[in-house]
Every structure is written in structure tokens, then in C-alpha cells.
Amino acid sequence: MESRYLSRVEKEFDELQKFIKEANLNLTVTRANGYENGYIAWKVIHESPIDESTEMQSIKSTIIVEFTDEYPFKPPVLFCSDSTQHCFLGEGNRISFNRLRDTKTEWLVWTPIILILAGVHDLFISYLSTNPQLFGCASPQVLAKKPDFDMKIPQTAIEKFLDFRTVHETSTGMNSVEQRRIIKLYDDEWDLAQIDNQLAELKARRIKVLKAIKTGLGSEAGLRRSGRRRKNQNEGD
């Protein structure tokens, strides 16, 4: 990884520490050993709070963030190292946000890691806390599980990120209004792609069903003709 990109990772690490504190996130982050394997890694501990009215203990999970030497041109790899396969994560407990998909249209070089980790924070609370709304997160029903890399970052997390960036706007970077506009545009484009995919699937299903109907009608017509022939033969006899 070039020094300028290494500098970006370090800057994002410092920004994440500040974000965690100011947004009151249930996260702690430390640098993990990874240089010897050709990548930089962070170890993020997430604690899903439990409603104080219950006697349950909070649930702690460990998320690993790996930056390869191709970052930021390739997305980082995020996965949960818990031994249990979580129903809301991809295979191998991989964090499967669509923004982490390795394509030119879905992973954007400017995407800040604090936005991704804000999404991880809210996602885990939504599924593992007894009362996610109490902690400013959506219910699991709102965040329906989809196939790998088809999950959207929770809107609650996006708002946390934008609130933080609004407070810390600088003249050298995109302001929060620009970021909100770009995030909205990105989500709209993704939604449009999903609609197009659904339309294509529906069209394929329609063709299949129509073919079955035509085949069925043809068979029915054949049976009717056969029945009439047998009837005529019987009458002739």
C-alpha cells in the first residue's frame, strides 16, 4: 500500500475514534496484526446493548476490517469472527453491504470507513438487542435479510454519519449536503437496478407461465378432439 493511502487509513482510524465517542457508538477499535500478510487490519469490538428491564447480558461481537494493498481502489473486507453464523450476515459472517461489493459502480473510492462501521453498529443492534428502537436503530423487520452484498446500510447509520460530518465540515472536503446528495443518488441508482432485476425476473416468469398455459391448452384441445373422435366412433358402431 502506497504511503499516501496508508496515511488515509491512519486518518480514518483517528476519525473513527472521534466518531465513536461523539456518536456514542457501542464500538471499540484497535489496530490488529496484518502487515506481515500484506494488509492492514483493525479489530472492532461491538457490544449490543440489552434493555435494562431484562436480566440478559449484552452480546459482544468481534468484527475484523482488512485493508489490502489495493485499498482504496478495492473495498476492505469486513467479517465477524464470532463462532456462530449470524442470520443477518453473509456466508462466513461476512458483512454484506452493497457498498462493499467489488464493482466500479458500487464501491466508491471516497466511501469513508466510518459510514460502513456505522452501518455495522446499527445492523448488529437491530438484530441482537432486545429493543433496538430504544438505541436509535431500526427493527429487524425493516432490515430484511437479502442475498450476499444486497444489504443496504441502515438509514439510521447514514444519519449518524451525516450528523458527525456536519459538525466537522472542512473547506477541503465534501460538505454534508453534498455527501447526502451523493448517498441519495447512489441509493436511488441501486434501487433502480433492483427494480430492473425484478422486472427481468418477472418477465422470465411470465414467459415460462405463458408457455405452460399454451402447452396445457394444447394438451386440453388434443384431449377434447380425441374424446370427440371416440364418441363418433361409438355412435357409428
Image: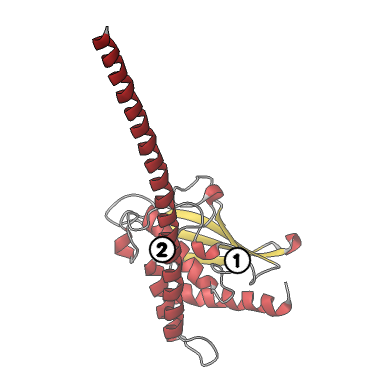
How far across and down, in percent of the image, does residue 190 sit? Answer: 45, 66
Determine whether 55 is above or below 231 in the image. Answer: below
Which disc number belongs to residue 114? none
Determine whether 128 is above or below 193 in the image. Answer: above
Q: Is residue 200 left or right of residue 50?
A: right
Which disc number belongs to residue 122? 2
Q: Residue furthest bottom?
A: 171
Specify how the rendered protein is coloured.
secondary structure
Marks 2/1: CA–CA distance: 20 Å
Rate crowding at label 1 as few (under 14), some (14 to 19) or many (20 or more) other CA atoms within 10 Å.
Answer: many
Mark 2 residue type: Asp
Tell me, yes or no, if residue 24 can be seen here: no
How far across and down, in percent of the image, does residue 195 sit? Answer: 40, 60
Mark 1 residue type: Pro
- Residue found at x 39% / y 59%: 125
Q: Which residue is mark 1?
A: 75
Rate crowding at label 2 as few (under 14), some (14 to 19) or many (20 or more) other CA atoms within 10 Å.
Answer: many
Element under disc 1: loop
The quadrant of the picture occupied by the N terminus is bottom right
The quadrant of the picture occupied by the C terminus is top left
* In the foreground, 202 or 41: 202
How far across and down, in percent of the image, does residue 6 sit? Answer: 68, 75
